[in-house]
Image (cartoon, rainbow, N blue to C red):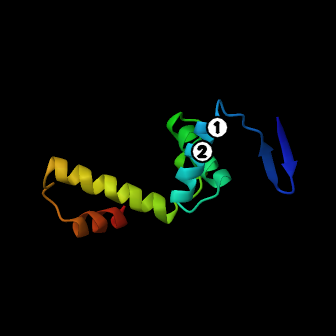
């Protein structure tokens, strides 16, 4: 059931227990986000994974998202070792395309 409140659509979400709600609340607080923003972001990411929404349709990444992705990339680089090309060269190549 979706209600439109102003220019926003409302979605009611019933959770199975208070523990899950508390976990969501803590996760949102760690990222300095509201529960609504945190849940919206999680739902959007799942829609992208499911192929229901393309990356271009999703909201832009937040600073926290970019930092998280950067950390994951750094960890992957450590695991696979040097890739044989400098990061600055990769950036130049990406800009040419």
Please say if the residues under marks 1 and 2 sit with CB atoms less than 8 Å apart. Answer: yes
At x 64%, y 52%, the residue is 35
Q: CA distance from mark 1 to mark 2?
A: 6 Å
Name above or below for residue 39 compared with residue 33: above
Q: Secondary structure at mark 1?
A: helix
Q: How far from the left and from the top, in percent, is residue 21?
A: 62, 41
Residue 44: numbered disc: none
Where residue 17 sits, quadrant-wise, is top right
Q: In the visual, does 18 lie left or right of 55?
A: right
Label 1, on which residue? 18
Q: How far from the left and from the top, in percent, is residue 66?
A: 43, 61
Label 2, on which residue? 22
Q: How far from the left and from the top, in percent, is residue 4?
A: 86, 48
Where residue 12 sits, quadrant-wise, is top right
Q: Quadrant of the C terminus?
A: bottom left
At x 60%, y 44%, the residue is 22
Q: How far from the left and from the top, in percent, is residue 96?
A: 34, 66
At x 21%, y 53%, the residue is 77
Q: Secondary structure at mark 2?
A: helix
Q: In the visual, does 78 lie left or right of 35?
A: left
47 or 57, which lies in front?
47
At x 35%, y 59%, the residue is 70
Residue 44 visible to an observer of this rendering: no
Q: Quadrant of the N terminus?
A: top right
């Amino acid at each position: 059931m979706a209600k439109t409140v102003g220019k926003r659509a409302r979605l009611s979400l019933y959770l199975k227990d208070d523990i899950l709600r508390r976990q969501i609340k803590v996760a949102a607080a760690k990222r300095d986000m509201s529960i609504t923003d945190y849940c919206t972001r999680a739902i959007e990411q799942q829609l992208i994974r499911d192929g229901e929404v393309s990356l271009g349709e999703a909201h832009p990444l937040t600073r926290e998202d970019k930092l998280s992705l950067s950390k994951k990339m750094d960890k992957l680089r450590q695991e696979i070792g040097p890739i044989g090309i400098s990061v600055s060269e990769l950036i130049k190549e990406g800009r040419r395309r």
